[in-house]
Image: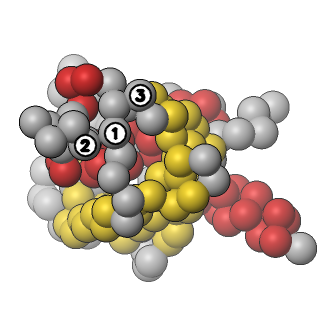
Amino acid sequence: MKPKNWLILKRKVRFGDCDSAGVIHFHNLLRWAHESWEESIDIYGIPHQDIFPDSNSHKNQIICPIVNCEANFLSPIKIGDLLSIKIFPKKINNHLFQVNTFFLKDEINVAEGKIIHCSLDVDSKLKVKLPDQLERWIEASNINTNLKEC
């Protein structure tokens, strides 16, 4: 059984996340966006080795490098802020998927991230179909989102 909140995560901003101006360093937003979808698939029940390559195993012959990413900062994010992180994955086509991430403080959207991944064969680097487990996670997240909107 899947936990209810595998698409909504929490993160507290730490001193090491911030720059000398006292706000998060820009690169942390994209790092948190990526870590959030990693954590989400973990909570959902997909073993990391089914998605991320393991050099010691030939089980996963697919890699999913980032081909596009962007971040938008809407309000300062400071040390001590407790953020809710909501992720919205979607399939773009047979080999591309996108994860939109919204960072909220006190229910107010303070930042957004977008990461697009491409599914490639690890040896040939040719585009291949997204892994089945990943497709199920994307599909389930869209069903979960659509049910809340009804």
Query: Which amino acid, mark 1?
Result: Lys
Q: Residue furthest right?
A: 150
- Left/right placement of residue 94 relative to residue 60 reads right
Q: What is the crowding at mark 1: few (fewer than 14 residues within 10 Å), some, or many (at least 20)?
A: some
Residue 101 is situated, as x and y percent measured from the top left of the image, at 46, 58
Please give the label number shown on residue 80: 3
User: Is disc 2 placed on a helix, strand or loop?
Assistant: loop
Using the image, tell me which numbered label, if any, was put on residue 23: 2
**Residue named by callout 1:** 78
Point out which mark residue 34 bears.
none
Q: Horizontal placement of 54 versus 102: left or right? A: left
Can I make out residue 26 in this image? Answer: yes
* Residue at the extreme bottom: 93
> Which residue shows up at 27% across the image and 36% down it?
53
Q: Number of marks in the image?
A: 3
At horizontal 82% and vertical 71% (from top left) the residue drawn is: 149
- Tag 1's secondary structure? loop
Front one among 16 and 127: 16
Q: Are marks 1 and 3 in contact (CB under 8 Å)?
A: yes
Which mark sits nearer the N-terminus, 3 or 2? 2
User: In the image, what residue occupies the spot 44% across and 78% down?
Assistant: 93
Q: Position of residue 37 (x, y in %)?
A: 46, 45
